[in-house]
């Protein structure tokens, strides 16, 4: 493939070429060099390409709640409405998947709580590259769905905790142990709302010596490079320093946080500390679409006006997860870069 401009995840290459065999990259570089290795018909792309996108947090099972739950009343009212709602709508989920444009994605990390099996079937039918379906627990019991009975061809499943207050400590530790043994990312919501530690202490009678959710999670021993904390709105300076020291991942969902009026993650503090960051869209119950480009544009507009294009692309291609680079033997997943986004960063 000959490409007008290519971002490899490290450098820009004008008049680039990508040689792909069996879905993996065999060579990447300037056209004048790679063309010597071509032995197949040439495809040309008159635009800019980059590594496939990574949406690190979404709840596609909630697609049927778009426009049906209150946002202005705050997080607590929204959460109660989501918990009570007759949420499942297969047609809405299929429409959401089609609108996302999964062909441009390298990975979508989706969370399922009440519709695990239907979501797994829909993901297996989807045209994307790879998905991770996280099976979330909101109880003091280990869900049966933690032991997948489906044969998955393109994706994978892993247990997840909802949060420190939503999942019992034993469930949280069980999920982390499973993920660690299987080499999967362990994910949970954290510091999304300020009262999470109080709620956890009241519900589970634990974490008495901790001063924050992050400190409590650290005491449990689950903060490491393979744990992904989602939202991180109410992180303190000491929390951020602790996350940086443990090399724990943080997924930002700025549009959802703004819509629910819960504040915004401390972008500057996280960035200065070197915390590993990725982006997610959250669900259609709190955002108007699942467009990761819109998430990046909102981040730049509201939290990170000094963000450069390359740093933004690192966020949306999941470099903190070890993805987002086009090099020999990497999966040949590509996404087109929208011209309107380039103009925003100029």
Image: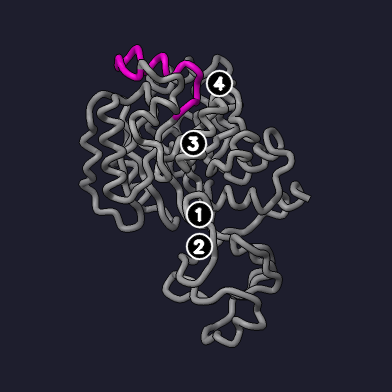
**Which residue is under mark 1?**
105
Which is more N-terminal, label 2 or label 4? 4
Q: Is residue 54 left or right of residue 311?
A: left
Instruction: Look at the numbered discs 2 and 1 and tell me whether their residues touch, using CB distance below 8 Å.
Output: yes
Q: CA distance from mark 2 to mark 1?
A: 7 Å
Eye-nearest disc, 3 or 1: 3
- Badge number at residue 333: 2
The tag earlier along the polypeptide, 2 or 1, is 1
The vertical placement of 247 against 52, above or below, is above
Determine the residue positioned at 58% across, 45% down: 292
Q: Which quarter of the image is occupied by the N terminus?
A: bottom right
Q: Which residue is mark 3?
A: 243
| x and y, in percent, of residue 31 in the image | 65, 79
Judged from the image, the secondary structure of the residue bearing numbered disc 3 is: helix
Tally of numbered tags: 4
Give the farthest residue toward the top. 202
Which mark, by number, is residue 50?
Answer: none
Residue at (56%, 30%) from the top-left corner?
Answer: 256
Q: CA distance from mark 1 to mark 4?
A: 29 Å
Please report contact status of discs 3 and 2: CB closer than 8 Å, yes or no: no
């Amino acid at each position: 493939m000959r490409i007008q401009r290519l971002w490899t995840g490290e450098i820009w290459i004008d008049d680039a070429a990508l040689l792909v065999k069996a879905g993996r990259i065999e060579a990447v570089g300037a056209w004048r060099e790679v063309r010597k290795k071509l032995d197949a018909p040439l495809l040309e792309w008159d635009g800019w390409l980059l590594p496939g996108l990574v949406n690190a947090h979404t709840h596609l099972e909630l697609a049927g709640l778009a426009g049906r739950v209150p946002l202005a009343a705050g997080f607590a009212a929204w959460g109660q409405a989501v918990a009570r709602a007759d949420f499942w709508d297969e047609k809405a989920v299929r429409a959401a998947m089609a609108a996302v444009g999964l062909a441009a994605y390298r990975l979508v990390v989706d969370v399922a709580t009440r519709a695990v099996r239907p979501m797994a079937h829909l993901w297996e039918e989807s045209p994307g590259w790879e998905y991770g379906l996280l099976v979330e627990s909101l109880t003091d019991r280990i869900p049966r769905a933690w032991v997948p009975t489906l044969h998955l061809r393109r994706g994978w499943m892993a247990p997840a905790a909802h949060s420190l207050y939503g999942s019992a400590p034993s469930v949280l530790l069980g999920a982390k142990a499973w993920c660690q043994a299987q080499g999967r990312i362990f994910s949970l919501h954290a510091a999304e709302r300020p009262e999470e530690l109080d709620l956890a202490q009241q519900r589970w009678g634990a974490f008495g010596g901790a001063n924050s959710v992050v400190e409590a999670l650290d005491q449990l021993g689950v903060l490491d490079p393979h744990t992904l904390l989602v939202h991180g709105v109410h992180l303190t300076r000491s929390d951020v320093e602790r996350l940086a020291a443990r090399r724990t991942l943080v997924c930002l969902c700025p549009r959802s946080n703004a819509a629910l009026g819960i504040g915004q993650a401390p972008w500057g503090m996280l960035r200065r500390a070197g915390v590993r960051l990725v982006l997610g869209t959250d669900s259609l119950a709190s955002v108007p679409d699942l467009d990761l480009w819109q998430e990046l544009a909102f981040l730049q507009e509201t939290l990170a006006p000094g963000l450069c294009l390359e740093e933004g692309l690192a966020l949306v291609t999941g470099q903190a997860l070890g993805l987002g680079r086009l090099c020999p033997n990497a999966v040949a997943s590509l996404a087109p870069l929208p011209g309107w986004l380039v103009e925003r960063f100029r």
